[in-house]
Every structure is written in structure tokens, then in C-alpha cells.
Image (cartoon, coloured by chain):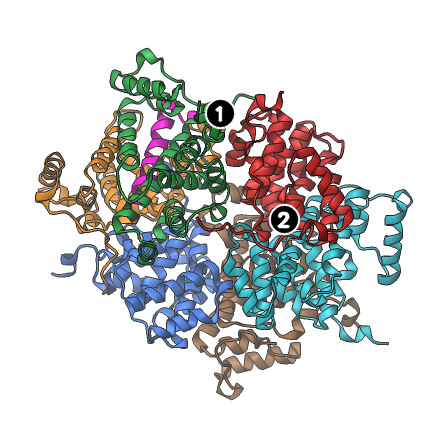
Chain colours: A green, B red, C cyan, D brown, E blue, F orange
Amino acid sequence: MTAVTDRFPLPDLADIAPDIRDKIVAVQEKSGFVPNVFLKLARRPDECRAFFAYHDALMLRENGLSKGEKEMIVVATSAANQCLYCVVAHGALLRIFEKSPLIADQLATNWRKAALTARQRAMIAFAMKVATDSAALEDADFAELREHGFTDEDAWDIGAIAAFFALSNRMANLAGMMPNPEFYLMGRVPREKKG
Amino acid sequence: MTAVTDRFPLPDLADIAPDIRDKIVAVQEKSGFVPNVFLKLARRPDECRAFFAYHDALMLRENGLSKGEKEMIVVATSAANQCLYCVVAHGALLRIFEKSPLIADQLATNWRKAALTARQRAMIAFAMKVATDSAALEDADFAELREHGFTDEDAWDIGAIAAFFALSNRMANLAGMMPNPEFYLMGRVPREKKG
Amino acid sequence: MTAVTDRFPLPDLADIAPDIRDKIVAVQEKSGFVPNVFLKLARRPDECRAFFAYHDALMLRENGLSKGEKEMIVVATSAANQCLYCVVAHGALLRIFEKSPLIADQLATNWRKAALTARQRAMIAFAMKVATDSAALEDADFAELREHGFTDEDAWDIGAIAAFFALSNRMANLAGMMPNPEFYLMGRVPREKKG
Amino acid sequence: MTAVTDRFPLPDLADIAPDIRDKIVAVQEKSGFVPNVFLKLARRPDECRAFFAYHDALMLRENGLSKGEKEMIVVATSAANQCLYCVVAHGALLRIFEKSPLIADQLATNWRKAALTARQRAMIAFAMKVATDSAALEDADFAELREHGFTDEDAWDIGAIAAFFALSNRMANLAGMMPNPEFYLMGRVPREKKG
Amino acid sequence: MTAVTDRFPLPDLADIAPDIRDKIVAVQEKSGFVPNVFLKLARRPDECRAFFAYHDALMLRENGLSKGEKEMIVVATSAANQCLYCVVAHGALLRIFEKSPLIADQLATNWRKAALTARQRAMIAFAMKVATDSAALEDADFAELREHGFTDEDAWDIGAIAAFFALSNRMANLAGMMPNPEFYLMGRVPREKKG
Amino acid sequence: MTAVTDRFPLPDLADIAPDIRDKIVAVQEKSGFVPNVFLKLARRPDECRAFFAYHDALMLRENGLSKGEKEMIVVATSAANQCLYCVVAHGALLRIFEKSPLIADQLATNWRKAALTARQRAMIAFAMKVATDSAALEDADFAELREHGFTDEDAWDIGAIAAFFALSNRMANLAGMMPNPEFYLMGRVPREKKG
């Protein structure tokens, strides 16, 4: 087997800026492993801090989208950008948040066939347009969202998540970032959560 | 949740032609469930028989490709056609044949990042050209395969599998065929194979 | 002139499996020549039998589509795949079935400009979506067919023909299959049919 | 059958400007019919005169391209633009100039499979880039032509023909111009040339 | 800095055909410089005369489009073809005719965001379809124009300008034509027009 | 004239978070106006802070790219995304940094025709691949950069700027952000820099 295309050496944990290292340790304690995105981006401390500040501002914000819906946007648009890291890592989060072992593979392969509500389908259609053809966005796209009960602030949130992962997908593809093996299975076996 | 887009009613098992029903029962006894593709295609007995005869002629043929490599072609080209059924069902077979829980998601998301040998990479590149731009195939594409040790008969096999799933993917998308839930998890947990 | 890109040697007639050879002889007696697709596929007897069984199940089936309409689907979708063999060979059949010397070139160049009924136009639009973007098929596409009097079984037939020639076009492009010179002129000169 | 999409009424011959009418009469006497492009463009006398002056400057110019080679460029690039009028009308001229009943359909369906010399293949590849992605032309494209014996003046001729038919194809598609039925058969039956 | 990709040597003014030289001198006296398109095309006198005859027939014709609207079509479609010469040179004319220093950059970057009337927006949408996908033009496109007050003769004018610049853009890209530096600034500084 | 598509109301300066307001005031004092991106993003303080922290980490970083070269990447990739705001605003910065009134329009229309060094051309080619097809990045792309003297850290910088503006372009298109009129002219008139 050939080595996978993992580019740019990872820093030693000892060389990572303390505030970023603290964040990494906290994630490790919670998840049991360090997602590769942290180590890869820690090479560039300022970019790393801005990346996670932006990520958290969008993904942790309390708004009209559930945590699962935010991850739906990430998985569908990351698949359009063929980003292995984000599809696999955020697919895991999506399965967990939605308590659905099937939804992530559906969204990643063909979002039109995923088990979504009509409202979620409109949300993904809008996000896909932001991801793949944002210059063609027009007022009718916002009107379509409103028909499904989304406010214009929700439209900003949907579009901003798609836009942020347009960045994130390109960084992962640039850096040859590979998902940790743990992500592939997370959320697929309902009973693993229990006892 | 909205109903998924499953089109065309499935036939009652009692109404299915005996030779096809026998085949379905045999699969069920081996796998523990009936893959939806059998029931969906059984609506049209003649097409169904030809479909599986063609499938078996390509996928069961002993040749220069391993069983896992044949499934690699299926998963990568079916992802290019955004065929949910084939990506999920053949992803399961691929994981089992290759004893690799990661390879299917890698090939489905971005084959260039999958853990493949250089020979397998050339095989997938050829298959993707057959799947997405076959009119541009030229002698140089066959020469590239030969450099990786493939004969022209191997080239036929690689291309014919990609061609057959060009048909299969379109039928699944036409019929709104949904993968059985069992497929999503198969081959992901190494220990499930054992006692 | 350079040799055209005809790949894979043709088998000697003596080496062809008897059941396939019988079929070839029957075609030759009826048409006056052996279409290259028979000789090219006869190299692989099992695939060859499945190919023609599938072809006949779709193209000879009595259903809501006339023989000419089935060939319209073949010519339009094969042109989208730039398949020289199928455009020329099935163009000949289309001209003969429709008794129209112009229809095949129209469909092959730009189906929107072909002399079709509104019903046939809807049929071709559906077939082209199956051929080029089947993942985006949605219920509205089936509803559009119904508005033109097609049943869902007709939709299956239209889509299945487009799907089968997605396979056929790729095999012809893979094998460098060239149409027999006879096909180019068939059905173009009305009087050649008569005495 | 629905009426084909022929837009913009044709002028009466009596209303056409005398110099253009003379040209039309001359063509009619030579060919036995008036190609629709003359009548359609005659609606706009100034554009009509400029169109044919440009056409003749390129197509009648004595240079490094034979009359047949110029028509090869027209047919291949017009097929890329899906222009029914130009593919059919210039396909007729190509068959006649090359004394080949097959070459036009080959070039229109997939130029890579047409029976061309290596030099002609390079010529068509260059013309197709001008037709479909002229902004990406670079010095290497001219160098490739030079390797096949073309001068830079030949490159201008090849590119200018492709550019002129980029205009012509769009005008025919805009005006819904339909090829005269005579064109479809011209040059297909060798004996029709003789007594 | 590398030399820009200016191909084909310019002729000496003394070697240019007198009627073309007179036209060039007249332009120079009016504009203060000779636009490169004149010198570049003067290499081929017959093509040059036809080019400008066609250009003038379309662009100087008195019809339902203002001079500024004609240039809007040129700038938007030339941007779609990534033609540096036409975007910059006709962007200058557009700014001057419309007395707007902003409109050209808006149309060249994303016409959907340009400050246009609804009528002009429909005009540009039609022109863009002619430029990029003319084979898909259908009666509904003409009906849309009529809803905004355009006649079918206006549709011809809009489409013909887009078609002519499909030619012009390809010639400029072929010849590596660079815009004169003067064009970049013209019409950007309102006060430069005055004393 | 119709109103341009400016979406989402701007906040009153008094309602903006003090740290962001201080930044805006500082920019205004330096530039003479407040670029619209600041007011538009200030609606969402956390996202706004992260956006500018990320922007500054990439664009103000001292590394192997000059300030002008960074802006070249921004203008070329923003044009590919048809982002009016970024093409016009960063086009102004590019003209000023490079002291070239022509370079921005060249890069925005067709980067292959811009007056660049071979090294800068390789830089833009890499950035365009990150912007438009990052999943296809492979080691050969990094090798090509190295041949032009770029380190892998430079490759990260080039790719990260393209990735960040993939986000930025989508946010501007989502929000209907219009460039301030001042940007269109900046850096075009050499003498305006002097007294």
C-alpha cells in the first residue's frame, strides 16, 4: 500500500503554543483522541486560533438551526468539495447528533435521497448553491427559505456554514489531511453509546 | 421526516418468477436479508435475469483483478454518479473483501486520497474516465495501464465494470432504490466477523 | 490516413460459441452484413449473451413506446455520450422505423430542434436527464411525463433504455468499436426500399 | 408532428436587395436549391453582406488547408456547439470535397474516432480549443501545430474558421435555422455523382 | 516580467491596404491612439474589412437598443469568454456611453449584481444564453424578452451582438491581442471629460 | 435603475461592539472611507473578529510572498468565484502595491494573459486549482511550485489565501455586498498619489 498523501509535518506537542495545546488536551480528554485538524493547523498558531474562533462562532451559536442540521450542511457541502476529512469527521458528529447511523452516508452520496424534512431539504439546497455557485444567488433563493420558515438570519447562518467549510475543505485538501480512523465508526452502532 | 424517494412498488414474493425467487431466497439465506436491488428489479423478470447474468459475468469472472479491486471500481464510479444504493451496498462488500473498514469511504469521497497501490490508482483513474468521459479514451490510457502491469484484457474488465455500473447507477437513481440498512455497517467492526 | 482506433482483435467465426454464432448468422442473413457489435462482444461469450438478452428485453418489449421512439432515445442519449457506433447504427434503425431520412441527424445534433411531437420531446428530455444527471431525478420529472400521457411503467422503459445505452456507449468507446459502413446510408434514400 | 422551431419570417425574394438576390440566384443555379442561410440572413442586408464576405475570405482563401480540411473544422466545431444547420449543410460539403461518405458523421459525433491523419487530428484539436476554451490557448498549442507542419499563418486560418463558426452556429441557433432536406443526403451515394 | 502573449507580428502602417489605413487614421484622429484590434486584423485585409463591416452593421444600427446597452452585451459576454481585449476596450466605451464609471466592472465580474433595469437584466440574460449555450435557446427565452418590451427584431439584435463577439473574443484570444493601456482608464474620471 | 442586491441591513455605528468600532474608525481615518465589508460583517461580532483575525494572519504575515503577490491571488481567485466586492476592492490594493494600473483587470479577466513573471504564473495556477478543484491537488502541483523557487510553506500560504477567499467570496455573494465606489478608481491614476 502506498502512503497516503499527508503533507506538512505535524508539530511536536511540546512546540505547540500553550493556549492551543490546552484546547487540544481538552478535546483529547473528551473524545479520547486528537482530531488531526488540530495538530495540522497548530503549525500556524494565528491561523489556527482564527479558524477555531470562526468555527465556534458558527457551529456553537444558538440559533434557528439544530446542532444536527448544522452538521448536515457541513457533510453535504464537504462532499461536493470531495473533502475526505470533513465528510468523515463531521459525518460522525452528524450521526451522533441526529442519532441516525444512516443520514451521513446519504447526505454525502446524494443529498436529494437523504431522509430529510422538506424544511431541511430547502436548507441543503440553499447551502449547496452557496458552496458551488454563490455568484448566482438571488432573492428567490432567500424567498424559498422563508417559505420553509427560515428567517434571513437563518439564511446567513446556513450560507456562512457553507462558506466556512468552503475554506475548511480547501485547507484539508491542500494539507492532505486524513481523518482519524476513530471517526469512521462513531455513531454507527447505537449500543456502543450505552453500558 | 419525509418518506424517501422510493419509486415503483415492490412485487409480492409470491408473484416473482420461480427462478428469480430461488435466487433471492439463496441470497437471503447467505446474507440474512434480501438486498433491495433484487426485489426492485424482479418486477421486470427478463431485465432482472439479464442484469444479474451480466453482473455475474463481470464480477465473478476469475481474472487479473481481485474481488476487492472489482469493488473498488464499483464504489469509485458509483460515487461519481452519486448512486446511493451502489456506494453503500458495494462499499460493504469492498470493506469485507479488503478487510479494511476505511477504504470504501475514502474511495467514495475522493479516490485520489484513498490508501491504494500505484497499480490500483491507475486502475481507478482508467475506470473513472470510462465512467465520466469515455469518448475521450485514447491509446495512451491503455498504455498507462500496461505500465502498471495490466493486460488489455484487464483493461476490458476494468472498463466493462465501470460501464455496467453506469447502467446500474442510473437504474437505482431512476427507481429511487434505497440501500438496506444492514449494508451501512457491514465490514466496519472487525470483531463482528468472529463468534 | 491513420488507422482508426479499433481495439481488441475480433475472434474468428469458427471460435465463437455456437449459440452466439447462430445469432450472428441469423442477423447476417436478415441484414446482409454482421454489425460489428456482435463480433466485438463475442470475444466474451457470457457478457455477450447478457448484453443481448438485456437489449432484447428492453428494445423488443411491447409497451407504450413505438419501435421508432425507442430508437429516438438511443440516438439522442448516445450522441450525448459521443458514441459513434450507436449514433450511426441506431440512427439507421431510427430512419427506417420512422420512415424519416432526417430525424436521426436532428436528434444526434440537437434534440431540441428535432421534428418531434410534444410527447416525444418530453420523453427525450427525461431520457437525457437519466443519461447525463440521473442523481438529480425527482418526482417532478415523473409528473412531467404523466402530463404527456406516459405511465410510470413507461417512465421505467424510457429510463432503462437510456441506462442500458449508458453501458453500451461506454463499451463501444472502450473497445474503439467502429460502425459498419452500411449503417451510414440505411434509411436515407426512400426509393432504395422499393424494387 | 409539431412545427420545428424556425423563427423570423423569410423575406420575399422580390424584397431582397438586388446584390444579395443575385448571389442567391447564382447559388440556386449551381446547387439546385437555395440554402436556408441565405434567405434567413437576407432579412438584414448589411449583416448578410458582411457574413458572406467574412465566410468567403476564410473558406475560399488559398492557403495551407485543403477545402476538405476547412470543412472538417466547421463540422467538428459546429457539433460542439450543437448547431444542426451547420453540421448538416457543411457535412454535405465535407463529404463531397473529401469524397468520403463517412467522414462527416464521424467528425460530428466524436472527432477523436474520425479517420484523420495525425496532422488533421492536431488541426481539429486546436480548432476545438478555439471553439470551446479559447481563453486557455497558450504558446504550447501553437508549438503542437508547428510539429505537424503548420505555420503560424495556418494557425490563424484554423482558429479563424473556428471563430467564424462560433458566430455562425449562434446565429443559426438564434434564428432556429433548419437545414434544407437536400443537404442530408448529398455526398453519401458515390454513384449520384456520375451520370 | 515576462513578455505578454502577443502573437502575430503587426504590419507596418505603410504596408496596410489604403482603405483600411484611412479607417485607422480616422480612428486615431478621433481617439488619439490606434486600438490594437485594427492593426492586428489589418494583417488580413479581406477578413478585416468583413469584421468591421459586420461590427458596424450591428453596433451602429439604429434600433431598440441604446449605444450603452449594446456595449453592456459586449462586456458581459466577453467576460464569459474571458476576453481581455474586449472586456477592457468595450468596458471603456460602456462607461462613456452610460456616463457610469462603475457599470463595466460590475458587468464583467457578475452581471447579476450590476446596476441594471429589469429590462436590461432580461437583455443580458438572453445574451449570455446565446454566448454560452445557444443550442438550448427556446421560444420561452423570446417570450421572456417580449415581457420586457423587446420585439423579436430586438431579440435578433441582442443575439447577433453576442454571436459576433463570440467570434471577436476568439480572434482576440487566438491572436493574443492586448488592450491599449489608454482603454483601462477611459470613462472612469468624470472630470477628465470636461475642459 | 433597480436597486442593487444589497441584503441584510447594516448596523448603526453606535450599536457596533467597541473593539470592532475602533478598528473601523482606524480604517476610516487611514482610507478616508469605511469599506463595506466591515459594516456588513459587524452585524455578527464573533464572526467578524474571526474573519479579520484570519485575514490578517494570512495577508499581513511576512513570508515568501510580497504584498502585491498576495493580492494577485485574491483577485484571480475572486474573479473565478465572480465576487464583485473582492475583485474591485482587492483590485484597488493590487494596483497600489504593484504600482501598476493594469494588472488587476488583467488578472480578473484572464490570468493567463496578465503581465506576470513565470514564478507568479505558477503561483496563480496553484491558487486557481485550490479555488476551483482542490480535491485534485496532488504532489506534482507542489513539485511545480518548488521548481519556481517556492517552499512548501509558501505553498501553504498560496493555498490558504485562496481558501480564505473561497470563504470571503461566498460571504460577499451571500450578503449581496457591494464595493464602495472609491475602490473602482484607486491606483489607476499614477499622479493622484502625488501632491
Q: Amino acid at mark 1?
A: Thr
**Magenta portion: prevailing SS class:** helix
Q: Amino acid at mark 2?
A: Arg
Crowding at mark 2 (Cα within 10 Å: few <14, some 14-19, many 20+): some
Q: Which mark is residue D121?
A: 2
Residue E131 in view (yes/no): yes
- The residue tagged with tag 2: helix, strand or loop? helix
**Which chain is home to disc 1?**
A
Choose between B186 and D71: the one closer to the eye: B186
Q: Which mark is residue D14?
A: none
Quadrant including the C terminus of chain D? bottom right
Q: Position of residue C133 (x, y in %)?
A: 54, 52
- Residue sitting at x 47%, y 25%: A192
Q: CA distance from mark 1 to mark 2?
A: 37 Å
**Which chain is home to disc 2?**
D
- Residue sitting at x 68%, y 38%: B28
Confirm whether circles 1 and 2 share one chain. Answer: no
